[in-house]
Image (spheres, helix red, strand yellow):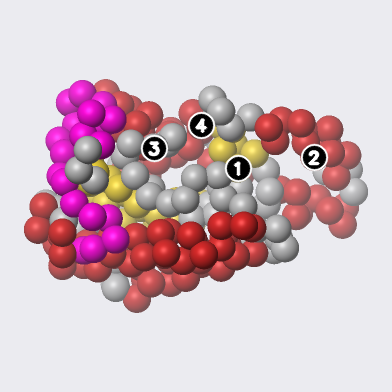
Amino acid sequence: MKTVFITGGTGYIGTRLIRSLLNNGHRVIALVRKGSENKVPAGCEIVIGDPLEASSFQQHIPKDAVFIQLLGVSHPSPSKAEQFKQIDLRSVKASADASSVAGISHFIYISVSMVPSKIMEAYQHIRKQGEEYCLSKNLQCTFIRPWYVLGPGHRWPILLLPFYGIANLVPAWRQKIKGMGLVTISQMINTLVKAVDLEPVKKRIIEIEEIKRN
């Protein structure tokens, strides 16, 4: 059994991940804002704090815990570039700062595929900065890099599957398409649960093809 501290535990991935971790026998602690306590699955411990301010929660992170950074702007799009700076980047920096003080064993961060994309350039830039900041704090890091996670309420990219099939037949497009592959919510949850049990290393990157195998 491991102790897992999570930000973004009331979201699309977070609630499902908490249930899965609890079912696997782990102790789970979720950082939530005041008023969101009832959104956390039963059996999960709760810490009330501000995910943008490390000082509000760092004292509640158990030493040697696994920290999972899920918090971020929902439904990323080019129009949300400023929100990425104010929420995604600030929150991962706060989490990395708090984790460094607490002495965690392993920092797991959901980043994004870094295959160049004009549409998602701002989002990729912020997530890359987040990765670099975590490494600068000398944390043992696992970066998980999906492109889009299919699940309830998140299924519109299925309409693009015919295009994916055609693009995969064109050698010049094949590699880029692999870097924009779609993964399912169950594949993401399985990947995250398995990452908790991995031996911490300085830097581990889990790309789309590996996510799909889970």
Mark 4 = which residue? 185
Task: Name the residue rendered at 18%, 51% in the picture.
Answer: 49
- Asked if disc 4 and disc 1 are in contact, CB closer than 8 Å, the reply is no
Q: Marks 4/1: CA distance?
A: 9 Å
* Residue 48 disc label: none
* Residue 11 disc label: 3
- Asked if disc 2 and disc 1 are in contact, CB closer than 8 Å, the reply is no
Nearer to us in this view, 152 or 209: 152
Task: Name the residue rendered at 27%, 55% in the picture.
Answer: 51
* Residue 164 disc label: 2
Q: Which numbered disc, 2 or 3, marks the residue that appears first in the sequence?
A: 3
Name the spot of residue 44 as percent of width and height, x first: 19, 31
Name the spot of residue 32 as percent of width and height, x first: 24, 44
How many residues crowd around disc 3 within 10 Å: few (fewer than 14), some, or many (20 or more)? some
Name the spot of residue 205 as percent of width and height, x first: 48, 57
Magenta stretch, residue numbers: 36-54
Q: Which numbered disc, 1 or 3, marks the residue that appears first in the sequence?
A: 3
Q: Amino acid at mark 1?
A: Tyr
Q: Tell me: residue 36, above or below residue 6.
A: above
Quarter holding residue 99: bottom left
